[in-house]
Amino acid sequence: MKNKIALAFASLMLMTTVLFAPTAIAPEWPPFPTVQSDHYTVVGGTAETCVQLWMGTLALSPMEWNCPFGSRAPYFTPMVQMQTINFSVAIDPTEGVLGPCVVFLTVPWQSIVSVDHVFWSDTLGFTRVQLLPTGDDGMGWLYLLPGISDVDMYVANTNVEGTPVSLWTGPSPMAGAVASSPAWGGFPDPGVDNMPGFLPTSDDGFGDGIPDPAGSSVLFIPLQMMVTSWNGTDWDLVFGGPFLLPLTTGTAYDIAVAPGDWVDGKNITKTGHPWMNLMDNPGMWDPYEPANELKKWVKYVCAWSFIRYQMAPGVWLDLVYGVSEYKVKDPHLIPDINGDQTVTIADVRIAGRSYDLYDEGIPASSRPGYEPPWWWEDQATTLNPETGMYYGPYPAAWVAVFGCPYTVFADPDFDARADMNNNGHINIYDVRAIAKHYLETIDP
């Protein structure tokens, strides 16, 4: 088994070609002119992923809900991810029945800053996961009135004759039908009307049968995932491929259907929140007003998977993931790291509980006195009794030359929500950055 793993790892590390599936979306976008543009920052959120990598018929160490955050809670570091969202004029697709009630969204790909994180993998060693824009803009829909949309996404992902396929699943109104659309870059098909979950036409699989409030929304953001591993002096390409974010403000559910595979039956559910304050002020939309207060914050969620997706010749990936993003418009940005729209003692306590703790994957030289795990020097020959795998891939000669350049595991109780300056260490700067906004609120 050891030789098979070593051979697979060596083959993986030698790969230099990555197969990126095209994610270009066919329809011209936006269908109506942009009249307002705002910058949003991800103040909070999570990312949880199940990963199974295949080299031919050899399955390499699976990761269950601990990627890309391998040794700590899956919280995003605040104020790092961001994007611009453009809003169109409100249109009336019902020809006078409802009045202007749909706004089209565009996310310019150049504005997207997403995940970039280093963690430890027994198979690959220090591993860096980056989510990068593809060169295609994101696109979305915002529904201004209550009861006109049903934007929940319930899907099951499987593989049919070598091709990953997404199916609507209950309680979707089209349970069992194909959800993913090649014309939309693999995202769920929004129907003939090109408006996902729009109830007056009801021609797609979005929804759970319960109409949603004003401010409900769907947003498609095409990203690509790049995975590299540390060779001692630089990051080597391991694999990469599409990473779709079909986001909703409703409920997102996905289950993997892969009989005989470890990933079979893995599922995740996430719940979002409509744009505020549209939820409380339905119909009060004036996109021409620069000081529009009706879109201060939103919570988008995603649940999705790829089953036996070919990343490179002879390399397949099973991937089940859930993402939540609490986005706040920049003029209203405060360190509301627990997501209740007000900076309270609860936010300060998050930093206090993590005080002087360090994250995984940060330069070991930035952590005074850091000592790697006991197995570090003999990782390639010492079995982990819990996994049956060797503790790591780096042989003794590599360790002797390069040492331990990054922290292998996060300190217990490290909470990335409090890492306000994104340096992997919770210190007095972070406490002060939160405390100076005490009792400030997004929704006064």
Image (cartoon, grey):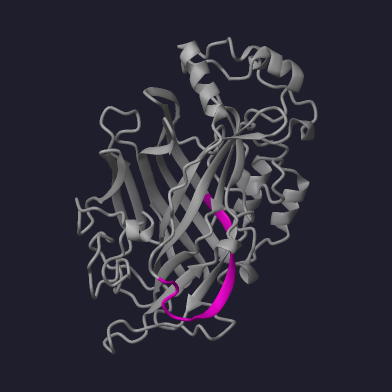
Query: Does 44 lie within the magenta span?
Result: yes
Task: Work out whether residue 444 can be spotted.
Answer: no
In the picture provided, is 203 more to the left or to the right than 54?
Answer: left
Task: Indicate the quadrant where residue 110 lies.
Answer: bottom right
Q: Position of residue 417 (x, y in %)?
A: 61, 48
Residue 273's x, y, as percent?
43, 62
Q: Where is residue 59 in the image (x, y as percent from the top left)?
A: 40, 24
Q: Main secondary structure of the magenta part?
A: strand
Q: Does residue 402 lie above or below 236 as drawn?
A: above
Task: Say which residue appears at 47% left-offset and 60% top-offset.
Answer: 299
Give the magenta-colored segment's residue range: 28-45
* Residue at 66% in and 15% down: 374
**Nearest to the observer: residue 314 or residue 385:** 314
Answer whether residue 133 is visible to the viewer in this image: yes
Give percent across and percent down for residue 394. 63, 19
Could you say which is closer to the camera, residue 262 or residue 226? Answer: 226
Name the image quarter holding the C terminus. bottom right
Residue lying at 69% horizontally and 41% vertically, measured from the top left = 424
Q: In which quarter of the image is the N terminus?
A: top left
Rendering quarter of residue 29: bottom left
Q: Does 302 sit left or right of 405 as displayed?
A: left
**What residue do we see at 55% from left, 45% from top?**
75
